[in-house]
Image (cartoon, rainbow, N blue to C red):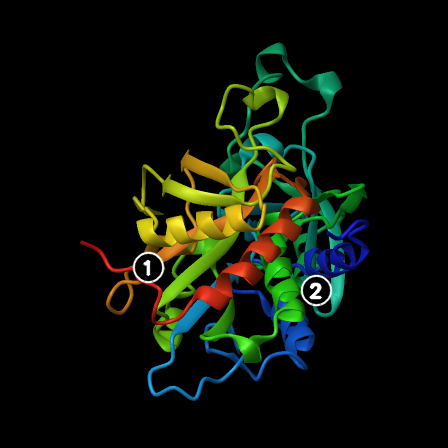
Amino acid sequence: MNSDFSKMKEILRGLTSCLALPGYEDSVIRYVKEHLSNKAQDVQVDPLGNVIARMNRSQAENPYRVMVFAHMDELGLVVNKVEEDGFLRLERVGGIPEKSLAGTTLLIETGGRQWNGIVGTKSHHVTRPEEKYKVLPVSEIYADFGFRSKQEVLDAGISPGTPVGYARQFFSNGSIVFGNALDNRVGCLALLELADRIDAAQLPCELYLVFSVQEEFNLRGVLPAVRKVNPHLAITLDITIAADTPDLKGGPDIRLGGGPSIGMYTFHGRGTLGGLIPNPKLVKQIQQVARENDIPLQQAVFMGILTDASFSQLENDGIPMVDLGYPARYTHAPVEAVDLRDVEQLVCLLERLLPACDHNLDLTRG
């Protein structure tokens, strides 16, 4: 097993340095295309921005198609008003936790330049007692990028609709990495690692690695790619919640360093009512492969989680699908944390699983 993870850290640092909110994933698209240029047989970017990498070409008349996918975008904010005095009003893009916003450092990229700012927070010395424990909704916050007037903001190329992300951060302690947008650049890292390691020409299936767009917006950006590939089975890679911090003790038994996760049940429980109950036979196949290769596998059951599997499983004739992933702490906060040992084992699991994916794999129901 990888001991120092220096290569994985380098790739992940590159991925997380990209500011890529839903609909603005171009920097990650370019990064992924460059990395795959000498590994995939064919790389296409569809009109929505999904990167579809066909790793091999089967000569069979009806090749068994496997799609492994992870989303490129990150949650963030968007400018919805520029005040006359140069402050910015914001709206959420995705599940931004308002409790994490006060004083958070922010980043805007426009016109080839980066602008750093903060979410304003009332000075402690003049905060009334009744305000000390109040979390402001997004509708009441503002961002300060140091502009003195509305005209300065507009001259900088910033206006309503401009995406705003968390400021970039990346540091580590051994295999544990802290950074922004680990959800889901770590999933992208796993796909790139898989592309590096697997000999796709020896697989019994056609393998498609897909880097999807707009998951944090409405989970449907991947749908055109699913329709195009029309896979016989699909695996999505994304975070699962690590419940090993002091505030989550007693929750689900999911921890950093405990191995990759397999989603046994995910359900949003509100709004879109999306989620995934995985194909039972596919789950058993993955569990068997994990046992045979001494790969620990953490079974995850969570309310309040959605992934790209939520609606893509319903495409075409219906697709056997499962969520595989990696535990993460502090999800959707400005800085998240993962253990690269879990990512390494996730890639190993995929390497061992794919050679068994062909028309002999029985995923039928009933």
Residue 62: % across, % down: 33, 83
Question: Could you tell me which quadrant the C terminus lies in?
Answer: bottom left
On screen, residue 152 versus residue 266, left or right, reads: right
Residue 120: % across, % down: 67, 36
Q: Earlier in the sequence, mark 2 or mark 1?
A: 2
Looking at the rendered image, the disc whose residue lies closer to the viewer, 2 or 1, is 1
Q: Which residue is mark 2?
A: 155
Residue 125: % across, % down: 75, 17
Q: Is residue 234 visible?
A: yes
Q: Residue at x 24, y 67 (%)?
A: 317
Q: Quadrant of residue 338?
A: top right
Distance between the alpha carbons at the discs numbered 2 and 1: 51 Å
Secondary structure state at the residue bearing disc 1: loop
Q: Which mark is residue 320?
A: 1
Q: Are marks 2 and 1 in contact (CB under 8 Å)?
A: no
The vertical placement of 165 against 188, above or below, is above
Nearer to me, 349 or 36: 349
